[in-house]
Amino acid sequence: MTEIDAVLVLDARAELGEGPVWDERGGALYFVDIMRGRVNRFDPADGSRRVYDIGVAVGALAPTDAGDFVLATADGFARLDPIAGAVRPIAKVEADRPGNRMNDGKCDPAGRFWAGTMALDEHAGAGALYRLDPDGAVHTMLRDVTISNGLDWSGDARTMYYIDSGRRSVDAFDFDAASGSIANRRTLVRVAERDGVPDGMTLDADGCLWVALWGGGAVHRYGPDGALEAIVRLPVQHVTCCAFGGCELRDLYITTAAIKLSDRERAEQPHAGGVFLARPGVRGRPANRFNG
């Protein structure tokens, strides 16, 4: 078993840092602070940060072919102009469910944006997983979701990996890139309670899965067969998501959260909500872009 340390690179002080994505064109890391409704841009070259106020909770973002970003906001999909900071709505989702919000999301290899929902009180089965197509059409892909979280696709685009945190597992689906359909759900990894709750996720160039563990203070690397291969240790409890970036995509950026920590725990974890960096010795893959 390989154990890897992570170091703090940005003391972001996010309440609920999530959804990191590396923008290769701009050489910067973007991530969200969900409940504060903020998108952050971090430039590791000079340490600078720009914060965009979206105005509502924002669960995830992904780059687009046009150079802007598609967002999963509290009530649907939108686009962010990173120069002007303007936000333009695309489509409403679950407008009839004010107790829900959108959570994690990512683009598939064909340029569709997938993101799911959850209840604010984390009520079981209250959420769903949606697919936003380039033409703006929204499709419901899964129902009876508790906390829709990390997702990614295999290098051959034949498998989609998905985490519903309520199930405490990483599941795999057969994926049809042409139609965007999924089928044949099965469990690849079952996360033990002592290890935390599976949250966000990314795949590396070798097809291995890097899974952030909420409450577990770690990121686990699993092989395509589900075997645990490496552990990244962090000095904070709530680890939310990870993404490869930097030179040759060899830097693993990890977002964390301070939300739900007691006053004592916050004092013991002063960098909770920060962005951490690990160098695991493998390469990641460029982020898929929305092509709408």
Image (cartoon, rainbow, N blue to C red):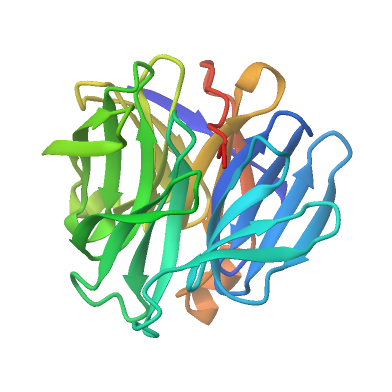
| Up/down of 95 relative to 66, above or below | below
Q: Can residue 67 be seen in the rendering of this structure?
A: yes
| Up/down of 242 relative to 54, above or below | above
Question: In this image, 39 relative to 91: left or right?
Answer: right
Q: Position of residue 198 (x, y in %)?
A: 31, 50
Which quadrant would residue 57 be assigned to in this image?
bottom right
Q: Position of residue 257 (x, y in %)?
A: 53, 62
Question: In this image, 261 relative to 255: left or right?
Answer: left
Question: In this image, 194 relative to 53: left or right?
Answer: left
Q: Quadrant of the N terminus?
A: top left
Q: Position of residue 239 (x, y in %)?
A: 46, 52
Q: Nearer the viewer, residue 60 or 169?
A: 60
Which quadrant would residue 129 be assigned to in this image?
bottom left
Which quadrant would residue 273 be assigned to in this image?
bottom right
Q: Residue at x 61, y 21 (%)?
A: 250
Q: Position of residue 256 (x, y in %)?
A: 54, 55
| Up/down of 151 relative to 78, above or below | above
Q: How many marks?
A: 0
Q: Quadrant of the C terminus?
A: top right
- Which residue is situated farthest in the front direction here? 135
Q: Nearer the viewer, residue 26 or 80?
A: 80
Q: Nearer the viewer, residue 190 or 63?
A: 63
Q: Residue at x 41, y 69 (%)?
A: 93
Q: Residue at x 55, y 74 (%)?
A: 35
Q: Can residue 188 be seen in the rendering of this structure?
A: no
Question: In this image, 8 relative to 161: left or right?
Answer: right
| Up/down of 34 relative to 234, above or below | below
Q: Residue at x 59, y 51 (%)?
A: 70
